[in-house]
Amino acid sequence: MHLRRPIIVLAAIALMATITGSPSSSAVAQTSGAYPAPSGAVLRPTAPSAPTTHPHFARATNTSAKKPPRFRKKVLPIRHKAGVSRPAHLKPIRYHGGPVMTGPTHLYLIWYGTWDGNSATTILPDFASSIGGSPYYAINAGYMQMDFSTVGPEVTLADQIADAYSQGKRLTDTDVRQIVSAAIRAGTLPKDEHGIYTVLTSADVVETSGFTTSYCGWHSHARMQKADIKFAFIGDPTTQGLTHCSAQTVGPNGNPGADAMVSVFAHEIVETVTDPDADAWYDSNGNENADKCSWTYGKTHQVNGAKANFSLGAREYLIQQNWNTGKHQGCSMTPLN
């Protein structure tokens, strides 16, 4: 979810403006709002100007002389309070030149740890099998890339495998990447640049970089087997901090941990398809589409003593809203444009 966005150095642009006598308006500086840039943060390369014929194709540009790091992630921060800050709603989301996932998108689930008898193994696959073509997912059709192609509507659950603690019960971010890489290298899962590989950890597994203390999930990408692979981490927060990663301690499907994971899963999917390489769609604070709506749900109803806002297949879910781009920007569960 949130990558700590770098502050873009515009000294060269200012110098050029001084020399030529005309200011430059082609670069927009990204500032680090709630998520400051870490030490050694990299700057992004300038991308060519977007076509101007599309009225909703807002684009930001910046400059750089450095290459991006080999590993970076975008995190969904823990739930400190219901809803996001007002400034996040006021800032428009903009395009920065990178690709989107035009589809079809293939979901791969890696069940890491112990999941015997846990209904999560049916709840999450049911969601993954049904989200494509839903009104909620259709919001992503507003996100396009340089050739005007958009995020496609087709999403399939391509495969799922089990991993019984191949990297132990304490995982680093690199361990998560290794779990995905090992599955592809061994042929257990195919190498698929149209895929999103999600590592789902059982409640006894700790992701040491901050699961339930600073974030609830994250997505990233890396070169694996000479391919650009998109992957994500989502853990079961039941024993490590359910209230930090869920709006309620009950769930519409009777499994609070799994229901919390579904909301994070939806969040990571829509962010990955609209910003797979962290260089496509985000606002000036680095917020991606789902970040701008994190921990907001819109209109809800009661199911099994729990709140829900989304009917999909035979199940009800409570998932965070998505951000609409275009003429009418804002959070919702259905397209506004």
Image (cartoon, helix red, strand yellow):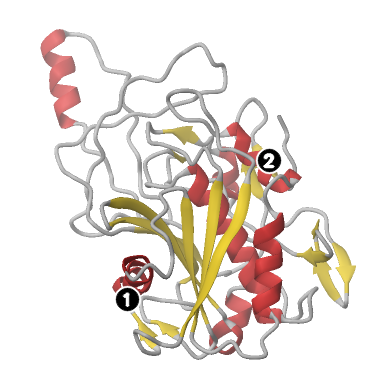
Residue assigned mark 1? 175
Q: Is residue 285 above or below residue 167?
A: above
Is 80 in front, or is 332? 332
Please give the label number shown on residue 138: 2
What is the C-alpha distance between the residues marked 2 and 1? Answer: 33 Å
Choose top left, top right, bottom left or bottom right for residue 54: top right
Q: Position of residue 63 (x, y in %)?
A: 23, 32
**Secondary-structure class at tag 1:** helix
Q: In this view, does 328 lie above or below 314?
A: above
Rendered residue at 71%/44% (across/down): 133
Is 95 in front, or is 26? 95
Q: Position of residue 307 (x, y in %)?
A: 81, 69
Is 243 in front, or is 180? 180
- Can residue 288 be seen at all in this image of the molecule? no
**2 or 1: tag closer to the N-terminus:** 2
Q: In this view, does 176 lie to the left or right of 334?
A: left
Choose top left, top right, bottom left or bottom right for residue 87: top right
Q: Residues within 10 Å of mark 1 (few under 14, many from 20)?
A: some
